[in-house]
Image: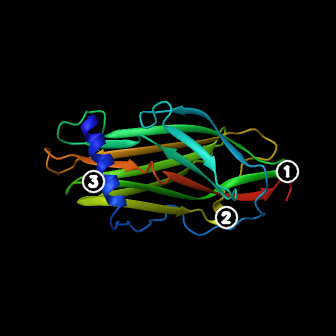
């Protein structure tokens, strides 16, 4: 199946040099949130653990933007594929990240928006799924975003999901709780030609996912 991955990588490179097709964003969480507080200094993100078939060792990383308003996660080998002679386990890939977000004393944060970026080749009759859920360790509140690409589709895609102000989930002040992010890619061949491969991947060149911060002072 290395040939499948190579073909997908070549396709993405070609698309990057030509006009790209952007699927319209389908907001999984309604509304547009605004920061409750200015962005504090001294913010960093540390990847504590990485697990899953979509993120083999050394293929996932996280970094904070220069203005500290967001952090990005990049997956270097996150690709799901099905059809033809594809590996039977290749149709679903997932990655579970456990992140420690270091914030200045007296502040806390929530995720107010997510942008996912990738590319896909989905045959007529097939579908591809992107699904992400995120939550703070020990919290019963679990936020989920999900998008489906229906074939026939060939090109890049971008999805933006914004969280309404009254739906923001902040890390409890004074508690050390890491942020868990579980992302899944899945391909269903459906009624498509069984001799043809469908695939979906997260972009490893321009950043796979961006998570926007909402800041709040503890006790405010």
Q: Tags 2 and 1 in contact by the CB under 8 Å rule? A: no
In the picture, measured across the screen, residue 194 lies left or right of residue 96, that is left
In the picture, measured across the screen, residue 152 lies left or right of residue 175, that is left
> Counting residues from the N terminus, which is met first, the one under dot 3 or under dot 2?
3
* Quarter of the image that includes the N terminus: top left
Q: Is residue 33 above or below residue 87?
A: below
Q: CA distance from mark 2 to mark 1?
A: 21 Å
In the picture, measured across the screen, residue 72 lies left or right of residue 155, that is right
Residue in the image at 28% along x and 35% along y: 2
Q: Is residue 146 above or below residue 95?
A: below
Q: CA distance from mark 3 to mark 2?
A: 37 Å
> Counting residues from the N terminus, which is met first, the one under dot 2 or under dot 1?
1
SS state under label 1: loop
State the residue position of label 2. Answer: 166
Q: Tags 3 and 1 in contact by the CB under 8 Å rule? A: no
Of badges 3 and 2, nearer the viewer stands 3
Residue in the image at 64% along x and 60% along y: 167
> x%, y% of residue 182?
51, 42
Q: CA distance from mark 3 to mark 1?
A: 46 Å
Of badges 3 and 1, nearer the viewer stands 3
Residue in the image at 70% along x and 56% along y: 68
> x%, y% of residue 95?
48, 38
State the residue position of label 1. Answer: 106
* Quarter of the image that includes the C terminus: bottom right
> x%, y% of residue 205?
45, 51
State the residue position of label 3. Answer: 121
> Counting residues from the N terminus, which is met first, the one under dot 3 or under dot 1?
1
> x%, y% of residue 207?
50, 52
SS state under label 3: strand
Q: For label 3, count other residues whose C-alpha is less than 10 Å away and answer few (under 14), some (14-19) or many (20+).
A: many
């Amino acid at each position: 199946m290395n040939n499948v991955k190579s073909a997908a990588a070549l396709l993405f490179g070609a698309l990057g040099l030509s006009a790209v097709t952007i699927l319209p964003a389908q907001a999984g969480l309604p509304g547009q949130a605004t920061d409750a507080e200015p962005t504090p200094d001294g913010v960093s993100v540390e990847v504590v653990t990485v697990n899953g078939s979509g993120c083999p060792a050394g293929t996932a990383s996280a970094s904070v933007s220069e203005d500290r308003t967001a952090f990005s996660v990049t997956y270097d080998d996150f690709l799901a594929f099905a059809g033809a002679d594809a590996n039977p386990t290749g149709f679903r890939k997932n990655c579970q990240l456990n992140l420690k977000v270091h914030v200045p004393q007296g502040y806390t944060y929530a995720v107010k928006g997510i942008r996912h970026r990738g590319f896909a080749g989905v045959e007529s009759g097939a579908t591809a799924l992107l699904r992400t859920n995120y939550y703070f360790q020990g919290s019963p509140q679990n936020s989920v975003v999900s998008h489906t690409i229906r074939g026939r589709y060939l090109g890049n895609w971008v999805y933006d999901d914004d969280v309404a102000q009254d739906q923001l989930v902040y890390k409890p002040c004074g508690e050390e709780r890491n942020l868990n992010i579980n992302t899944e890619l899945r391909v269903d061949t459906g009624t498509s030609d069984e001799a043809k491969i469908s695939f979906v991947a997260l972009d490893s060149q321009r950043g796979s996912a961006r998570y926007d911060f909402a800041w709040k002072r503890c006790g405010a």
